[in-house]
Image: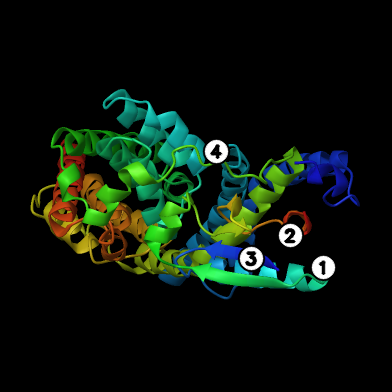
Amino acid sequence: MTSVKVYGPGCKRCETTVDMVRDAAAKLGLEIEVEKITDPKSIAMAGVMSTPGIAIDGTLVHAGGLPDKTKLEGWLSA
Amino acid sequence: MNSDLTHPSHPSRPDWLWHLGVVAAVALWWMLYHQLAPLAEWITGLLPVARHSHTGEAIAFFLYDVPKVMMLLTLIVFAMGVVRSFFSPEKTRALLSGKREGVGNIFSAGLGILTPFCSCSAVPLFIGFVSAGVPLGVTFSFLIAAPMVNEVALVLLFGLVGWQVAATYLAFGLGIAIVAGFIIGKLHLEGWLQDWVRDIHSGASASTQIAGESMTMIERYRAGTQAVWEIFGKVWLWILLGIAMGALIHGYVPEDFMVKIMGAEAWWSVPAAVIMGIPMYTNAAGVIPIVEALLGKGAALGTVLAFMMSVIALSLPEMIILKQVLTYRLIAVFIGIVGSGILAVGFLFNLIF
């Protein structure tokens, strides 16, 4: 099971990112667990400076703006 | 990461088509832009109103200004979207972390314009900078410049008021960010951060690398287009409302109406403008058309610029976000210093122009 963390204070783009992650995983047939991190302290501790940020199994793969769909699928299946 | 090789993104469209498309779009833009004035006159002429009546003036103003501003905005936001894709908060932080105050403040204010920034990530960005050893004052220069000197404000000033005012706004906006950050740095207020922010200092690693990111030129174009959609989604209604308001003032409010309350003679109008601007929170798009109309009716340039800077740079919602990392004392100092800078700019302008 892949664990995905989405970092963001809860703005609209962060919600969209969560949906995008779920959609991509569904498309690839992957079972994932998505966690939303909204606390600014935890966001900062993870090294994310521009939100939304995405970490997959503890590795930060993206920060700032909506992720690219194709890339997102690439990160999830890597 | 070899995943880029196995997942070529969007293989359907070749690169040259993108380059060609961008060039063609810019050419088309150029042609259309130069036809806007005759087009607006022509449409106004078709309407059953006298061209030089109040209504005629207001309609012609509206029909010319709306497409002009929208087109300028599209071009500049796209260009800035592409330029910004070369910058990121992580790179900016790496550039700034070794810098000393003074030079650091100048760099920081400049990078504030170029680095992608959204006020919703102000807090993580602040912590990221401070924890990586970017001096507090240098961080503030960034946080003041990033929202205040932005392409939307500059485009609207350029399109509606003229390049001189846009250039002046750019210069003085940067000036305030540099000087205010420098003073905050000299005051050594690190102790006035919230406790947990100070504790994080040693904790976070300064060299966070983001594993999956690298961009092709095509992706940068996409970033530009995405920026256009995003900004338009946010500001189009404000621009319409603002210009409609501007058109009404343009057509109906008598010349010199504003001279008494917002003219250069009324010295108290500058502090009043700054204070009124603090609780108001809108983006540059909502203010500027009103600004233009006020200027046209005799309001003093300094007063109007002070109002605009105050609305954009000193806003209550942003203070509430910053409250998570700053104590009230530090926020008060921040408002005091930036507010004084804006006041000084306002008075200076009223004196010169």
Of callouts 3 and 2, which one flags the residue occurring earlier in the amino acid sequence?
Answer: 3
| Residue located at (23% from left, 49% from top) | B306
> Measured from the top left, where is residue B41 in percent x and y?
59, 58
Q: Which residue is at the front of the view, B330 or A40?
A: A40
- Given contact means CB atoms under 8 Å apart, are the residues at marks 2 and 1 in contact? yes
Category of crowding for the residue at label 1, using alpha-carbon neighbours closer than 10 angstroms: few (below 14), some (14–19), many (at least 20) = few
Where is the N terminus of chain B found, in terms of image quarters?
top right
Helix, strand or loop at disc 1? helix
- Marks 3 and 4 on same chain: no
Mark 2 lies on residue:
A76
Per the image, the residue denoted by label 4 is B87
Residue nearest the observer in this picture, B160 or B43? B160
CA separation in Å, label 1 and label 4:
32 Å
- For disc 2, the chain is A
Q: Is residue B320 visible?
A: yes
Q: Read off the chain for label 4.
A: B
Relative to residue B215, is residue B239 depicted above or below? below
Upstream in sequence: badge 1 or badge 3: 3
| Residue at image mark 3 | A3
